[in-house]
Image (cartoon, rainbow, N blue to C red):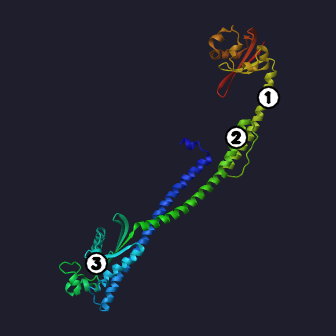
């Protein structure tokens, strides 16, 4: 905290602006990341939906065409079985994009069509709610995060050729999948029998998310950097530079004691008003100083030309004024006695003053001393006695008492 306090105003303002903008930049980057993530996931849903539709439509198209063309399937034409052909086409397409496209069912015949545990849980939703058409989630496969999309499909009339009543199935189907061991018979039209599954590795999506977020971050960071620079220059020109001129003017006054240097005004804002106030204060102080100097000059002439000795001192006896006639009377120069106690100028014969001390003596005797003129014995520099006639006055300035003694030999 002290390190921050000791910095210059421009540095402090720039640090505060930078901290605020960096916070806004961090918030903007976070929101941009979330926006990009939502956008990319939405795009992934659209792509997966297209793949799932194509896989389902491919299977249904082949089933319809075989039925219309009265194509008889056989072991040699196993690859033309709609679900098999659709899965193989989906696998070829998915390899080009790094996706995995297949059709799954709990009542599978091919082990490759068996759902994973997570896919099986999603299939249960379709079985429980036939109106639910799709579902998707982010899960993991072999420890790697993936985006999984499922699109439910139902049994069509063309599906019953191989999945209807066991006795109506083609002979090679009966041979490959005996009815007592197979679970894929007795489909009913409109029944949810499985789903098209599309798996997209998340690293592919994250790469796009990070790339887009980085692009937005660099763009936003460039704007914030330019904003920090512009604000820094604005603060320097509009705030710190005028304040520096003001500080320089004040320092010059403190150094020289002269109220002559003014600061040019360059605007009508708050800084300009402050400079106007400073310049007005300079004029006022200059006028006051001139009056004070003139008054001091007259006072100095008056005291230095007076026929009587004039000594002013504080309540503790410290001498603050010693005029020329006082120098002649006591034999001391002004430089020698300023700051010295007034008791040095009082002869030892004044025992009460020396015994009580100046402070106590003035506290008890001031009223008596002020009312009339007294005779006292002073002490010259050489120690000889000096008979004097004393007239004392008391005054107060800034809450402090001081006394002025007029002495005549």
Q: Nearer the viewer, residue 342 or 81?
A: 81
Per the image, label 1 sits on a secondary structure element best described as helix
The answer to which image quadrant residue 255 occupies is top right
For discs 1 and 3, the disc positioned in front in the rendered view: 3
Q: Identify the residue at the far front of this view.
A: 76
Q: Identify the residue at the far left of this view.
A: 180
Q: Nearer the viewer, residue 217 or 372?
A: 217
Q: CA distance from mark 2 to mark 3?
A: 89 Å
Q: CA distance from mark 1 to mark 3?
A: 114 Å
For discs 2 and 3, the disc positioned in front in the rendered view: 3
Left or right: 184, with 227 as reference point: left
In this rendering, is residue 324 above or below 6?
above
Q: Which residue is under mark 1?
A: 297
Per the image, label 3 sits on a secondary structure element best described as strand
Contact check, label 1 and label 3, Cβ < 8 Å:
no
Residue at 24% in and 79% down: 184
Counting from the top left corner in percent of width and height, residue 121 is at 29, 69
Using the rendered image of the protein, determine whether residue 227 is visible from the camera's viewpoint. yes
Q: Which residue is under mark 2?
A: 250
Mark 1 or 3 closer to N-term? 3
Q: CA distance from mark 1 to mark 2?
A: 26 Å
Using the rendered image of the protein, determine whether residue 46 is visible from the camera's viewpoint. no
Quarter holding the C terminus? top right
Q: Which residue is under mark 3?
A: 192
Q: Nearer the viewer, residue 348 or 227?
A: 227
Residue 266's label in the rendered image is none
Counting from the top left corner in percent of width and height, residue 313 is at 69, 20
Residue at 81% in and 18% down: 307
Mark 2 or 3 closer to N-term? 3
Residue at 59% in and 49% down: 13
């Amino acid at each position: 905290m002290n390190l921050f306090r000791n910095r210059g105003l421009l540095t402090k303002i720039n640090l505060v602006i930078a901290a605020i903008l960096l916070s806004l930049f961090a918030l903007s980057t976070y929101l941009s990341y979330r926006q990009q993530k939502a956008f990319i996931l939405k795009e992934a849903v659209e792509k997966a939906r297209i793949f799932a539709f194509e896989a389902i439509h491919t299977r249904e198209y082949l089933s319809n065409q075989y039925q219309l063309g009265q194509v008889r399937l056989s072991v040699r034409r196993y690859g033309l079985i709609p679900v098999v052909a659709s899965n193989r086409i989906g696998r070829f397409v998915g390899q080009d994009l790094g996706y995995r496209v297949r059709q799954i069912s709990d009542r599978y015949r091919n082990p490759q069509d068996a759902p994973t545990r997570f896919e099986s849980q999603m299939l249960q939703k379709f079985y429980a709610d036939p109106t639910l058409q799709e579902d998707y989630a982010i899960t993991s496969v072999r420890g790697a995060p993936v985006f999984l999309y499922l699109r439910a499909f139902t049994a069509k009339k063309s599906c019953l050729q191989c999945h209807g009543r066991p006795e109506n199935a083609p002979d090679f189907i009966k041979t490959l999948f005996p009815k007592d061991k197979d679970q894929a018979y007795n489909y009913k039209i409109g029944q949810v029998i499985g789903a098209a599954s599309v798996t997209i590795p998340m690293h592919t999506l994250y790469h796009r998310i990070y790339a887009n977020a980085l692009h937005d971050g660099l763009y936003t960071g460039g704007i914030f950097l330019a904003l920090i620079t512009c604000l820094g220059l604005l603060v320097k020109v509009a705030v710190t530079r005028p304040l520096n001129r003001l500080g320089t003017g004040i320092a010059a006054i403190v150094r020289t004691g002269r109220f002559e240097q003014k600061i040019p005004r360059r605007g009508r804002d708050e800084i300009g008003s402050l400079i106007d106030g400073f310049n007005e204060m300079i004029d006022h102080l200059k006028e006051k100083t001139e009056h004070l100097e003139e008054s001091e000059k007259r006072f100095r002439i008056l005291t230095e030309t007076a026929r009587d000795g004039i000594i002013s001192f504080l309540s503790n006896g410290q001498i603050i004024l010693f005029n020329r006639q006082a120098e002649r009377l006591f034999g001391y120069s002004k430089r020698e006695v300023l700051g010295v106690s007034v008791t040095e100028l009082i002869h030892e014969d004044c025992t009460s003053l020396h015994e009580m001390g100046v402070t106590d003596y003035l506290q008890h005797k001031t009223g008596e001393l002020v009312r009339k003129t007294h005779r006292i014995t002073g002490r010259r520099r050489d120690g000889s006695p000096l008979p004097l006639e004393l007239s004392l006055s008391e005054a107060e300035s800034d809450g402090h008492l001081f006394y002025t003694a007029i002495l005549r030999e």
